[in-house]
Image (cartoon, helix red, strand yellow):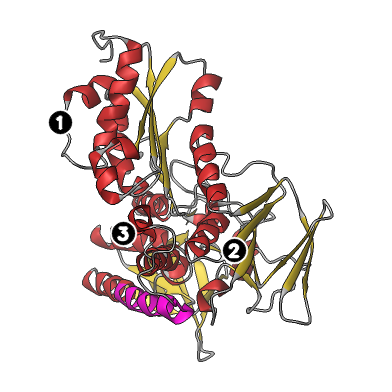
Amino acid sequence: MMQYDLIVVGSGPAGRRAAIQAAKLGKKVVVIEQGKRVGGVSVHTGTIPSKTMRETALNLSGWRERGFYGRAYRVKEQISAEDLRRRLIITLDHEVEVLEHQFARNRVQHIRGRASFVDVNTMQIVKEDGEVVQITGTSILLAVGTKPFRPDYIPFDGKTVLDSDELLDIEELPRSMAVIGAGVIGIEYATIFSALDTAVTIIDPKSTMLDFIDKEIVEDFTYQLRDRNMKLHLGQKADKVERLPDGKCQITLDSGRVIICEMVLFAAGRMGATESLNLAAAGLQADTRGRLSVNPETFQTSVPNIYAAGDVIGFPSLASTSMEQGRIAARVAVGAIAKEPPKFFPYGIYAVPEISTCGLTEEEVKTRGIPYECGIARFRETSRGHIMGLDSGLLKLIFSLKTRRLLGIHIVGEGATELVHIGQAVLNLKGTVEYFVENTFNYPTLAEAYKIAGLDAWNRMGDLKSTAH
């Protein structure tokens, strides 16, 4: 029986970062992946595919140029599902190649197969050819990710009623689509297909969406969706989904409203992929959504030598944070020092338009009773915005009136997920409004919006010396 210092189950962002970190510390590491290729959900059905589809859709549709040339402008008149898939395959092949090279370079072993616990130190692996092997590890990290939630009352068929994993394999682009679920995944795909001129309807039982995002940003985002004729049925539940004889779908809402469309995407949540792990053999138990509870500083489960990281432990379920969780868990697992990451990290939603945020929302600042001021910049106020033909886009900065320190950055618009890192650095380094007022930004750039928003807040706050230390 092979003995390892660290067994990693799953090769997504958390798993691969953990494995490489432990290997760089001179430990013997093995990664178990049940998929045909390494990379996990992030590479094959989640982060990379959805962002590749988004980029392809915006490029081929001419979306970014419509501010100049009108809504009828197209780069390619007839965009097919195959057009989207072609770029996706090239991107995924590159991602897998890079990952396999990283494993080889760092001498991380890789076993393909389905893993399950025998006891707290032993795992059984059923390989694709049916061979069964057992390995033991001093520590074990579970980075198995998630799978789409598929309730029994939804008649999934993989063609007209799909989950977010199946959406990548569609043969034709629908003329109309209903998206059940106004979470991050649902919103991203809904807006991508809207950019491809599919008539999109969003349905969610909650009366609000993206509640963890600053309310003013969500309001601006919602306005942009409605402006391009997307239908939002919030506060209404999909009671029944049926396939009609003519091949279309009918959705009946609890309000009595009926929606007819060519395709239904069900994106109302995901579940931890823990069902096949035989957790009970290791003394572990997942919650009703298959997720595991961990110590948020060490990522240890209730069993001291077993760790979990990534989407399987729940919010924020980001590839970026999963990587850091995996790295920290690996260091703790092999006895190395692990520093806690900065308190604030960026959150990116790759919708059309993008949303990105870091730090406190205005609602959180109010709840904490912090005296504050906001600065706003609209992308159309920047020269770069005019050059790009942008008529929308908003950057919002929140500052403490007492310390003048930056408390939060919130952006909706083109390039939001890139722009947010400037604010993230200032926030974590405890910078003040004076940073944005006194520093020079490249011109013309969208980053100049930081200076505009900083001046907007500074004018209201008054020209006082910073009291921050």
Going from N to C along the chain, the mark reached first, 1 or 2, is 2
Would you say 390 lies left or right of 228 here?
Answer: left
Mark 2 neighbour class, 10 Å CA radius: few under 14, some 14 to 19, many 20 or more? many
Q: Give the position of the C terminus as an image quadrant.
A: top left
- The answer for how far apart the CA atoms under marks 2 and 3 are is 48 Å
Going from N to C along the chain, the mark reached first, 1 or 3, is 3
Task: Write down the residue under mark 3.
Answer: 22
Mark 1 neighbour class, 10 Å CA radius: few under 14, some 14 to 19, many 20 or more? few
* Secondary structure character of the magenta stretch overall: helix
Task: Write down the residue under mark 1.
Answer: 440
Q: Give the position of the N terminus as an image quadrant.
A: bottom left
Quadrant of residue 185 within the rendered picture: bottom right
Please state which of residues 63 and 4 is positioned toward the viewer in this rendering: 63
Q: Amino acid at mark 3?
A: Ala
Task: Write down the residue under mark 2.
Answer: 199
- The answer for how far apart the CA atoms under marks 1 and 3 are is 41 Å
Q: Which residues are magenta?
A: 78-94
Q: Secondary structure at mark 1?
A: loop
Residue at position x 56%, y 44% from top?
Answer: 210
Q: Secondary structure at mark 2?
A: strand
Would you say 235 lies left or right of 35 here?
Answer: right
Callout 2 touching callout 3 (CB < 8 Å): no
User: Residue 76: x and y, percent?
Assistant: 38, 74
